[in-house]
Amino acid sequence: MDELDYNTCNATFRSLTDQQRLMVEETSRLIGADADLELTSYGCGFGMFELELIARVPRRTVWFQGVDTNGEAVERLRSELAGLPKVRGHRVFTASMADVADLRITPTEYGLFVQSLCYLGADEGMAVVKEARNRHRRLIVAVTPLNRLNGPFAESLARQGVVRPLFAQTLAEELTRFGIEFRTVTVGAEIAVPVSEPAHRLLEFLTFARHQPWLGGTSRAELLDAVAELGTVSAGHVRIPHPVEVFGIG
């Protein structure tokens, strides 16, 4: 994205959907209540999901381990974790998901992949999943189905040479092929874009939704028409389905 800053577009996109809140609620339910939690997140980024999960999960304390390729994100997340009384310890370092066998990664009760496995092709991704099963008692994987909204994302992955990325349908097929037992819950999230949104916010949303610079008209009416093509107009909002499948493995 060279016309608008990626992080700005991403932040706008995320602010208009309830997907993260609902994923956190479902993940917290799967983890359940107990005294302490040891959790490893692969592809933790700035920890937007993980920090909300730590606050919500019904555990007394949390020991957190995070892995991400973005060094800036890792540093910021370390700082955030250091100020949380509920976090009794943490290790966050720079590595890729393909480095799941890295000896620095300590085995924990749970391994977490939130919208990260879809960046990997089926062969590489399943190698990561199988290794993670050896390190963690249970895995929780949240990944979107391949649908109209994330079709442009899949196209961008294909241009990068990612073969059969692990969207929900492909992940289920691969887990079945390898005889790995799993359970899934569909989180029925949606994006709600107010029809009153200013043009710059609509432009940011479209840029991120299409994973490429917006090449259409830039008047507010034209931008709103393009957003409306992705969903239906109801009660002053364009409502766009934004589901995610949450897999429990192990």
Image (cartoon, grey):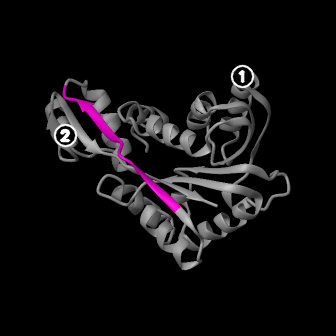
Local crowd at mark 1 within 10 Å, few (<14), some, or many (≥20)?
some
* Foreground pick, 229 / 169: 169
* Residue 217, disc: 2
Which quarter of the figure is the C terminus placed in? bottom right
N-term-proximal mark, 2 vs 1: 1
* Foreground pick, 131 / 205: 131
Callout 2 touching callout 1 (CB < 8 Å): no
- The three-letter amino acid code for the residue at tag 1 is Leu
Residue 106 visible at all: yes
- The three-letter amino acid code for the residue at tag 2 is Gly
* Foreground pick, 158 / 57: 57
For the residue labelled by badge 2, is the local secondary structure a helix, a strand or a loop?
loop
Residue 214 within the magenta-colored segment of the rendering? no
* Residue 84, disc: 1
Q: What is the magenta segment's predominant secondary structure?
A: strand
For the residue labelled by badge 1, is the local secondary structure a helix, a strand or a loop?
loop
Report the magenta residues as a range: 183-195
* Residue 36, disc: none
Q: Is residue 186 left or right of residue 182?
A: left
Instruction: Using the image, determine if residue 163 lies above or below residue 93.
Output: below
Which of labels 2 and 1 is toward the front?
A: 1
Q: Is residue 156 left or right of residue 96?
A: left
Estimate the spatial distance between the alpha carbons at disc 2 and disc 1, rounded to whole Å.
Answer: 45 Å
* Foreground pick, 9 / 240: 240
